[in-house]
């Protein structure tokens, strides 16, 4: 689908992560992805997180 649309949408990304999580039988993948997404949106785009808030969730991004 991303090839058809010539880009990744948020919906496609979340669907891909769900699929990977299911294939690996690892629910943590979904949780790690959501932490990474939250950091991306709230930390990068919106600049609403302070350094400590980013630091606390960094371990989940590294696990992903």
Image: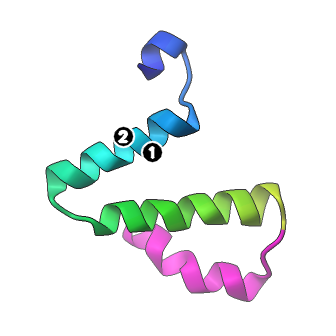
Q: Which residue sits at x=21%, y=64%?
A: 26
Q: In this view, does 62 lie above or below 14?
A: below
Tell me how far mark 1 sits from mark 2, CA to CA: 5 Å
Q: Which mark is residue 61?
A: none
Examine the image and state in which quarter residue 51 appears.
Answer: bottom right
The numbered disc on residue 16 is: 2
Whole-percent x, y for residue 60 in the image: 45, 74
| Quarter of the picture holding the C terminus | bottom left
User: Looking at the figure, which quarter contains the N terminus?
Assistant: top left
Q: Give the image location of residue 25, x and y in percent.
A: 15, 59
Q: Which of the 4 image quarters holds residue 44?
A: bottom right
The residue lying at 83 percent from left, 59 percent from top is 46
* 30 left or right, relative to 60: left
Question: Where is residue 10 drawn, in percent x and y?
Answer: 56, 39
Quadrant in the rendering for residue 16 = top left
Magenta residue span: 48-64
Q: Are marks 1 and 2 in contact (CB under 8 Å)?
A: yes
- Looking at the image, residue 48 sits to the left or right of residue 21; the answer is right
Q: Residue 14 carries which label?
A: 1
């Amino acid at each position: 689908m991303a090839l058809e649309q010539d880009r990744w949408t948020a919906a496609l990304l979340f669907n891909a992560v769900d699929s990977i999580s299911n294939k690996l039988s690892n629910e943590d993948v979904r949780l790690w992805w959501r932490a990474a997404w939250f950091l991306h949106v709230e930390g990068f785009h919106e600049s609403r997180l302070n350094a400590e808030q980013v630091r606390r969730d960094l371990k989940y991004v590294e696990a992903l």
